[in-house]
Image (cartoon, rainbow, N blue to C red):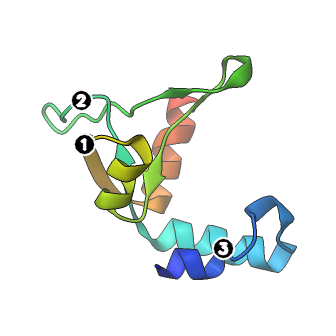
């Protein structure tokens, strides 16, 4: 288990406000491994976009590369980014 696991003893949406704030702070300060659609080219990253109901998309990030591969049930190209930078990139991409 990781430090993020320790913070998420209950589902995020069920946690009290203070606990959710602590999780978001830790995510922002943590190195996260985000799934890529392909290997990076010239330092350009193309995030793997996963379809959601209603036409929305999501990206998948974990706190370790092994967890990321396990979540997708296959090896996957990935990039390690601080959570704060990942959030910035996701917002810019509209994901």
* Label disc, if present, on residue 91 of the rendered structure: none
Residue at left offset 46%, top offset 79%: 2
Q: Earlier in the sequence, mark 1 or mark 2?
A: 2
Q: Nearer the viewer, residue 6 or 57?
A: 6
* In the displayed structure image, the side of residue 73 where residue 53 appears, left or right: right
Q: Tell me the distance, in whole angstroms, between the alpha carbons under discs 1 and 2.
A: 11 Å
Q: Nearer the viewer, residue 39 or 85?
A: 39
Q: Which residue is mark 3?
A: 8
Compared to residue 34, the image places residue 26 above or below, namely: below
Nearest to viewer (mark 3 / mark 2):
3
Question: Could you tell me which secondary element the residue under label 2 belongs to?
Answer: loop
Where residue 49 appears, x then y in whole percent? Answer: 47, 28
Question: Could you tell me which secondary element the residue under label 1 belongs to?
Answer: loop
Q: Are marks 1 and 2 in contact (CB under 8 Å)?
A: no
Where residue 75 appears, x then y in whole percent? Answer: 25, 42
Judge the density around disc 2: few (<14), some (14-19), many (≥20) Cα neighbours within 10 Å.
Answer: few
Residue at left offset 58%, top offset 29%: 94
């Amino acid at each position: 288990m990781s430090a993020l696991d320790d913070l998420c003893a209950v589902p995020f949406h069920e946690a009290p406000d203070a606990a959710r704030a602590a999780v978001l702070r830790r995510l922002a300060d943590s190195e996260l491994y985000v799934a890529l659609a392909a290997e990076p080219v010239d330092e350009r990253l193309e995030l793997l976009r996963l379809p959601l109901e209603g036409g929305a998309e999501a990206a998948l990030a974990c706190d370790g590369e092994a967890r990321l591969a396990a979540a997708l049930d296959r090896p996957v190209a990935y990039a390690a980014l601080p959570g704060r930078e990942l959030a910035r990139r996701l917002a810019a991409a509209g994901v």
